[in-house]
């Protein structure tokens, strides 16, 4: 590690939701321009995340955000889709990092020298920064999806399986950004189809 110069961090946001793409952030922090208060994005308020995101954009050497689509999640499964999103994010960094810390217990299939760290978003500043980038960008995306697909409350829960979301799924059936491979979405789809069939027969 003595000759390592550019250390990046990467993390994802959106593995647990029933809807929407999974996002990944990647950040190369500038040691000459430190950012105070970086932490696991889940431990920060939305206001604090927005403030830190602005500083990351201004002070980092480079930051990127990428995503894997709902279609890719359904085709690959969420783990492999998350790895794909992180691979896209890190591959887009310029300059290319010498070493990458990855939040979690496995590393994407790539050529970068890297290490997986469980809880890395609370242990390594670059991973914390990446978690903030991923979370902020995904939340903003889900706010846009809330306008495109009203009634599901995406602006409230970002696609996570809250009671409100599950009720909306049962009443409305899945929309275009729901992950069809997820059990609650499958069940809601079957329920909606059965209800439609019953209504047609009547």
Image: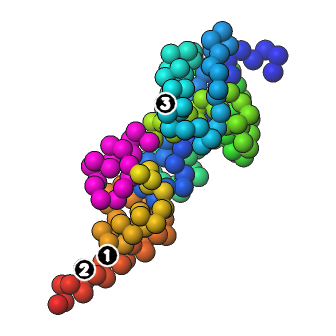
Q: Residue at x 20, y 84 (%)?
A: 199
Q: Residue at x 49, y 46 (%)?
A: 22
Which of the two labelled residues, at mark 3 and mark 2, occupies the earlier sequence position? 3
Magenta segment: does it hold 150? yes
- Helix, strand or loop at mark 3: helix
Residue where numbered disc 2 is placed: 196
For the stretch drawn in magenta, the main secondary structure is: helix
Q: Residue at x 68, y 27 (%)?
A: 125
Percent position of residue 8, x then y: 64, 25
Estimate the spatial distance between the alpha carbons at disc 3 and disc 1, rounded to whole Å. 38 Å
Estimate the spatial distance between the alpha carbons at disc 2 and disc 1, rounded to whole Å. 6 Å
Image mark for residue 50: 3
Image mark for residue 192: 1
Q: Which residues are magenta?
A: 139-155
Displayed quadrant of residue 60: top right
Q: Residue at x 28, y 81 (%)?
A: 195
């Amino acid at each position: 590690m003595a000759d390592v110069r550019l250390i990046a961090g990467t993390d994802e946001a959106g593995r647990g939701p029933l809807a929407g793409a999974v996002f990944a952030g990647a950040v190369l922090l500038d040691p000459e321009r430190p950012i105070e208060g970086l932490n696991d994005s889940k431990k920060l308020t939305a206001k604090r995340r927005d403030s830190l995101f602005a500083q990351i954009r201004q002070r980092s050497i480079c930051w990127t955000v990428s995503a894997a689509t709902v279609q890719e999640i359904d085709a690959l499964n969420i783990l492999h889709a998350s790895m794909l999103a992180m691979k896209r994010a890190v591959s887009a960094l310029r300059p290319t990092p010498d070493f990458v810390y990855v939040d979690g217990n496995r590393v994407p299939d790539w050529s970068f020298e890297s290490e997986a760290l469980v809880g890395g978003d609370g242990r390594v500043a670059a991973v914390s920064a990446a978690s903030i980038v991923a979370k902020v960008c995904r939340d903003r995306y889900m706010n846009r999806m809330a306008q495109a697909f009203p009634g599901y409350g995406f602006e409230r829960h970002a696609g996570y399986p809250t009671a409100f979301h599950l009720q909306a799924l049962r009443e409305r059936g899945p929309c275009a950004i729901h992950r069809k491979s997820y059990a609650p979405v499958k069940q809601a789809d079957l329920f909606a189809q059965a209800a439609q069939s019953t209504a047609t027969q009547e």
